[in-house]
Image: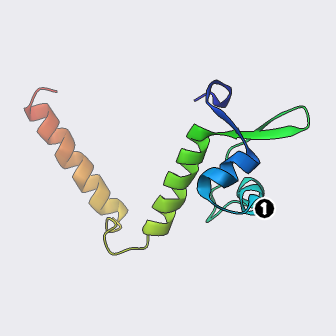
Amino acid sequence: MKILEETPLTIPQVARKAKVNPSTAWRWTAKGVRGVTLETFSVGAKRYSTEEAYVRFIEATTQVANSGRAESLPAQTVAQRERDLQRTDRELKELGI
C-alpha cells in the first residue's frame, strides 16, 4: 500500500467527511482511537491523510469496537487452533491440494 498513490485529503477535509470537529480528526492522527491512528503524511508544513486511509481507519476502529461483542468469534486455545490446522491440512491433502 502506497499512501502517496491514494486520494489526498487535508485533515479538515477528513473532519468534514466524518462530520466531526477538526480537532477530533487531528486527535485521530496523534492519539488515535482504541489503539488505531489515522495514517498521515506531510508535504512541507502541511499534513494530509487519504480517502483510503480514512476508510481503513473507520474499518479498524469498528473492528476493535466490535471485538467485545457476542457476535465475535470465540477465542481459541493454542491446542484448539493446532487441532483445527491439522484437520484442515488433512482435508487439503485428501483433496490433493
Between residues 61 and 13, which one lies in front from this camera angle? 13
Which x, y percent locates residue 5? Answer: 63, 24
Q: Which residue is mark 1?
A: 23
Secondary structure under tag 1 reads: helix
Between residues 76 and 51, which one lies in front from this camera angle? 51
Which x, y percent locates residue 39? Answer: 68, 44
Q: Is residue 35 above or below residue 90?
A: below
Q: How is the image coloured?
A: rainbow
**Which picture quadrant has residue 30?**
bottom right
Quadrant holding the N terminus? top right
Amino acid at the residue labelled 1:
Ser
Write the residue at 59% across / 46% down.
54
Write the residue at 69% across / 59% down.
32
Q: Is residue 46 above or below residue 77?
A: above
In the displayed structure image, the side of residue 59 where residue 35 appears, left or right: right
Between residues 35 and 12, which one lies in front from this camera angle? 12
Residue situated furthest left in the rendering? 94
Which x, y percent locates residue 97? Answer: 16, 27
In the displayed structure image, the side of residue 85 where residue 51 appears, left or right: right
In the displayed structure image, the side of residue 52 where residue 73 appears, left or right: left
Residue situated furthest right in the rendering? 45
**Which picture quadrant has residue 77?**
bottom left
Write the residue at 71% across / 57% down.
25
10 Å neighbourhood of mark 1: few (<14), some, or many (≥20)? few
The count of marks equals 1
Write the residue at 46% across / 59% down.
63
